[in-house]
C-alpha cells in the first residue's frame, strides 16, 4: 500500500487529492502519514533517510521513496490512468504537466519568498522587501490562474477534477497568508469553493482539517 507523508496545507495536498482520486476510481486505499513540521518531524534521521531534502510530500511505495509533487502525480497517473489525475489525451496531458510544473517551479517558490523570507536574506528590512515584492508577483500569478479557470470547462483540463486543480486550490489558500483577499479574485474564489465540494478534494480537506480560505484582514 502507498504511504503519503504530508503536512496540512502544504503542497502535499496535491498528491493527497490524487490518491483520493485513485481510491475513488479503483478502490485502492493508501496510508496517510502526518508530518508535523512545527515539531521538526521532517528533519529526523529516519525521515531524512527517505527524503534528504526534508520536505513533503513523500510517497513510499513498497519501501521505495518518491519525492516532488510533479513526479508523484505523474507516477500515480501512469499507474492509474482511469483516476483522471492528468488528462489521457497526449497533448492535453502535456499541457496539464506544463501548468503543474509552472505552479511548482514558479508560483510556489514566489510564495516561499513571502512566507519564509529568512531563507533568502538576513535582516528584517530585507525580509519586509522580499515579502512586499514577492506578494505583488504572487498576486499576478493568481490572476493568471484565474484567467485559466475562466477558460476551463468545468475544471482546468476538462470534465474531471485532477492534480492541477488541487494545486490551484492550494495556491489560492496560500494567497490569504500573503494578505491577498480571495474576494478580489471572484471567479477563482467561486471555482475553489465548488472544487472543495467534490469528493476527493473534500476528503483531503477533511483529513488535513483545512479551512478553505486563510485571509484575515488587518
Image (spheres, helix red, strand yellow):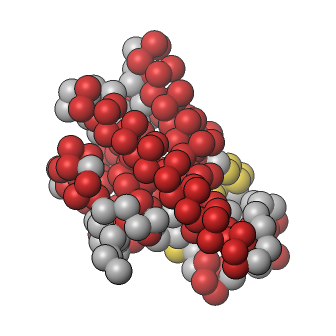
- 95 vs 28: above or below: above
Camera-nearest residue between 211 and 25: 211
- 185 vs 101: above or below: below
| Spot occupied by residue 20 in the image (x, y as percentages of width and height) | 36, 52
**Residue at image point 46% right, 65% down:** 178
**Residue at image point 47% right, 22% down:** 95
Image quarter for residue 117? bottom right
Return the residue found at the far bottom: 39
| Spot occupied by residue 2 in the image (x, y as percentages of width and height) | 54, 54
Query: In the rendered view of the protein, which quadrant contains the C terminus?
Result: bottom left
Name the side, left or right, on which 140 lies relative to 200. right
Name the side, left or right, on which 60 lies relative to 143. right
Does any portion of residue 27 appear in the rendered image? no
Does any portion of residue 128 appear in the rendered image? yes
**Residue at image point 64% right, 86% down:** 39
Image quarter for residue 102? top right
| Spot occupied by residue 149 in the image (x, y as percentages of width and height) | 28, 35
Image quarter for residue 44? bottom right
**Residue at image point 24% right, 32% down:** 150
How many marks are shown on the rendered structure?
A: 0
Name the side, left or right, on which 128 lies relative to 30. right
Name the side, left or right, on which 139 lies relative to 78. left
Camera-nearest residue between 70 and 62: 70
- 107 vs 115: above or below: above
Amino acid at each position: 500500500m502507498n504511504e503519503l507523508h504530508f503536512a496540512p496545507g502544504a503542497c502535499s495536498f496535491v498528491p493527497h487529492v490524487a490518491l483520493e482520486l485513485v481510491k475513488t476510481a479503483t478502490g485502492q486505499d493508501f496510508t496517510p502519514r502526518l508530518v508535523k513540521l512545527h515539531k521538526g518531524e521532517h528533519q529526523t534521521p529516519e525521515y531524512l533517510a527517505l527524503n534528504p531534502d526534508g520536505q513533503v510530500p513523500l510517497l513510499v511505495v513498497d519501501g521505495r521513496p518518491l519525492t516532488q509533487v510533479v513526479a508523484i502525480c505523474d507516477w500515480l497517473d501512469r499507474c492509474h490512468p482511469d483516476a483522471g489525475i492528468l488528462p489521457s489525451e497526449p497533448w492535453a496531458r502535456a499541457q496539464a504537466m506544463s501548468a503543474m510544473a509552472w505552479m511548482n517551479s514558479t508560483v510556489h517558490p514566489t510564495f516561499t519568498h513571502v512566507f519564509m523570507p529568512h531563507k533568502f536574506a538576513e535582516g528584517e528590512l530585507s525580509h519586509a522587501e522580499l515579502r512586499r515584492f514577492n506578494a505583488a508577483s504572487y498576486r499576478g500569478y493568481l490572476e493568471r490562474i484565474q484567467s485559466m479557470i475562466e477558460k476551463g470547462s468545468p475544471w482546468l483540463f476538462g470534465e474531471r477534477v485532477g492534480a492541477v486543480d488541487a494545486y490551484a486550490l492550494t495556491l489560492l489558500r496560500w494567497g490569504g497568508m500573503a494578505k491577498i483577499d480571495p474576494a478580489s479574485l471572484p471567479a477563482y474564489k467561486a471555482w475553489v469553493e465548488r472544487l472543495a465540494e467534490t469528493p476527493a478534494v473534500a476528503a483531503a480537506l477533511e483529513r488535513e482539517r483545512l479551512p478553505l480560505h486563510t485571509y484575515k484582514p488587518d
